[in-house]
């Protein structure tokens, strides 16, 4: 029944999907945290930038961002984010950039929601003992905000895992790209679809269950 799988690196394609997810998740967490800090910060220019970034990026389709990363940055401006002329090499890096740019807007809002759960009195007390805004944010507010934002961030991570399929549009050899090739070459549409659906369930369901358990363990009791 599964003889048609010979010659196709299904596990390798899903490993590329995992790499896309992990690298984009790390980049999105870092950039999204900085954006959240800007949005709650005291500097009007930074607040305006953070607000504009989130509102604009969230309303642009991910496909447009990924295609701009490939056609705009690489084909037009010659930016490949590193050495290497192999299509899959620079396409992978540009896909990570596009996914990071897009997902960080949602990470920002998840973290900002967590920041709003921290009592204002704690920040005021920290400022009263002489801590700067940056110290208050990173030493007092964000540690509690992350604990409150685990569940929303889990949803963002699951969405990111599924969004990696868009990277196939610029030639990244991840799961969706391989599925497209297999559907075109093999007369096993239902079975191929079931295999890849099962593969994505294996990636997303454990993530939701594990991080859901973590969310309950680290929740701030008020």
Image (cartoon, grey):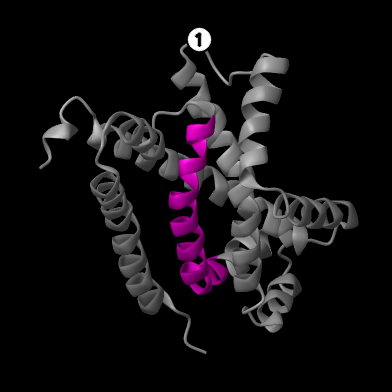
Q: Which residue is mark 1?
A: 85
Instruction: Tell me the crowding category of disc 1: few under 14, some 14 to 19, or many 20 or more residues within 10 angstroms, Cα based.
Output: few
Residue 5 belongs to magenta span: no
Magenta segment, principal secondary structure? helix
Residue 168 located left or right of residue 46: left
Where residue 184 sits in the image (x, y, percent)?
36, 31
Residue at figure coordinates x 69%, y 74% from the top left: 123
Residue 126, above or below 15: below
Depth check: 56 or 53 in front?
A: 56
Occupied quadrant, residue 11: top left
Residue at figure coordinates x 44%, y 58% from the top left: 158
Residue 222, above or below 138: below
Depth check: 187 or 30 in front?
A: 187
Depth check: 131 or 12 in front?
A: 12
Total numbered labels placed on residues in the image = 1
Residue 152, above or below 98: below
Residue at figure coordinates x 67%, y 39% from the top left: 64
Residue at far right of view: 44
Residue at far bottom of view: 222
Where residue 154 sits in the image (x, y, percent)?
45, 64
Depth check: 211 or 220 in front?
A: 211
Where residue 209 sits in the image (x, y, percent)?
31, 69
Residue 97 located left or right of residue 180: right
Q: Which residues are magenta?
A: 143-169
Residue at figure coordinates x 15%, y 28% from the top left: 6
SS assignment at label 1: loop
Residue 121 located left or right of residue 177: right
Q: Would you say residue 77 is visible in this rendering?
A: no
């Amino acid at each position: 029944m599964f003889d048609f799988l010979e010659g196709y690196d299904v596990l390798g394609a899903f490993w590329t999907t995992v790499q896309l997810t992990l690298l984009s998740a790390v980049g999105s967490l870092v950039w999204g945290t900085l954006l959240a800090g800007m949005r709650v910060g005291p500097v009007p220019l930074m607040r305006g930038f953070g607000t504009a970034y989130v509102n604009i990026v969230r309303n642009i389709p991910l496909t447009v961002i990924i295609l701009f990363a490939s056609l705009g940055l690489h084909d037009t401006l010659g930016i490949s984010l590193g050495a290497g002329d192999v299509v899959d090499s620079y396409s992978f890096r540009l896909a990570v950039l596009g996914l990071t740019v897009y997902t960080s807007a949602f990470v920002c809002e998840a973290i900002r929601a967590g920041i709003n759960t921290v009592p204002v009195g704690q920040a005021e007390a920290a400022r009263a003992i002489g801590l700067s805004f940056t110290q208050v944010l990173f030493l007092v507010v964000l540690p509690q905000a992350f604990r409150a934002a685990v569940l929303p961030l889990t949803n963002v991570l699951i969405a990111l895992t599924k969004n990696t399929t868009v990277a196939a549009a610029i030639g990244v050899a991840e799961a969706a790209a391989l599925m497209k090739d297999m559907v075109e070459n093999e007369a096993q549409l239902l079975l191929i679809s079931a295999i890849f659906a099962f593969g994505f369930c294996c990636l997303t369901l454990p993530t939701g269950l594990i991080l859901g358990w973590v969310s309950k363990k680290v929740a701030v009791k008020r």
